[in-house]
Image (cartoon, rainbow, N blue to C red):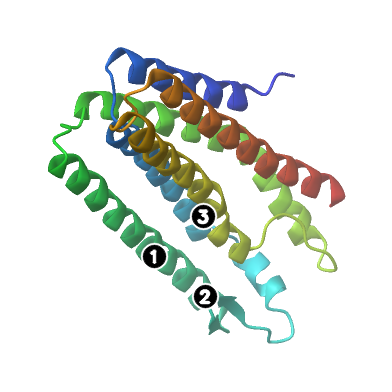
Amino acid sequence: MPDRSTQFLIAVNLINIVMAIIFKWSIYDVMLVYWFQSVSIGIFTFYKLYSYPIEKINQEMEGGKALEVNDLAVTNPIAAKIFIAGFFALHYGFFHLVYIIFIVGFASSEGFPLDLIGGLVGALLFFANHFYSYLVYKDEDNNLTETYNGNSQSSSGPSIADLFSKPYTRIIPIHLTIIAGGAISHLLTGGPFQNIIILLFFMGLKTLMDVIAHKKKHKQILFAGQDG
């Protein structure tokens, strides 16, 4: 069966590349769209953390073991769930608040008006993609929970601490790639993504990294479910 979630992700990235070419986006327009994608990833991650089964947290904390996130330890299962979800929202949210200030500030100072309509279209496409991906893999996530609850001697699927950290391992390389592309474009052409070849190369590289990260994440979920 074709992986329609991956196909959807590729299509959304390609549509954004086409819009970048047609509307002559600067690096800040590109970063704005990918900022929205990061926010979408954060929204669904927060929901997964908030809805994470207490039974799995109890299993992970078996024997009085504390859950640790960023060197902060919590020993009560319910408090751990609320703390980790809340801490993620604050930590991830603050990171993206600073990031959007950086994008808007630099775009304004360099005289590049942001394409807000194009950014909104790109944002909605990425949100739709991540929502579709959530629906497609929801059954696998549920199966992991059932397997876990049905066998107290083994665990399967990502832990709540893993869920907390996974978004960062996906988005940071993507954004560093685009920032590097903008810097190289400045050095070679004197402007951010003024050269169409540079724009295509780095947005294409971002798309490849996006797809690899997406497939790696869900491949791990499927294999974990089979191990249960």
Q: Are marks 1 and 2 in contact (CB under 8 Å)?
A: yes
Name which of mark 1 and mark 2 comes first in the sequence.
Answer: 2
Residue 70 marker:
2
CA gap between label 1 and label 3 equals 11 Å
Residue contact at pointers 3 and 2, CB within 8 angstroms: no
Disc number for residue 168: 3
Q: Amino acid at mark 3?
A: Tyr
Give amino acid for label 1: His
Query: Image height check: is 30 above or below 102?
Result: above
Locate residue 143 relative to residue 49 in the image: left or right. right
Q: Secondary structure at mark 2?
A: loop
Q: CA distance from mark 1 to mark 2?
A: 11 Å
- Give above or below for 186 relative to 155: above
Density class for disc 3 (Cα within 10 Å; few <14, some 14-19, many ≥20) is: some
Q: Residue at horizontal 34%, vertical 32%?
A: 30
Which residue is at a point 40% across and 67% down the rendered structure image?
86
Q: Pointer 1: what residue?
A: 91
Label number found at residue 146: none
Q: Position of residue 106 (x, y in %)?
A: 21, 46
Query: The disc labelled 2 sits on which kind of residue?
Result: Asn
Local SS, label 3: helix
User: The N terminus lies in which quarter of the figure?
Assistant: top right
Residue in view at x 29 percent, y 32 percent: 190
Q: Does the residue at mark 1 contact the one at mark 3 (Cβ under 8 Å)?
A: no
Quarter of the figure with residue 198: top left
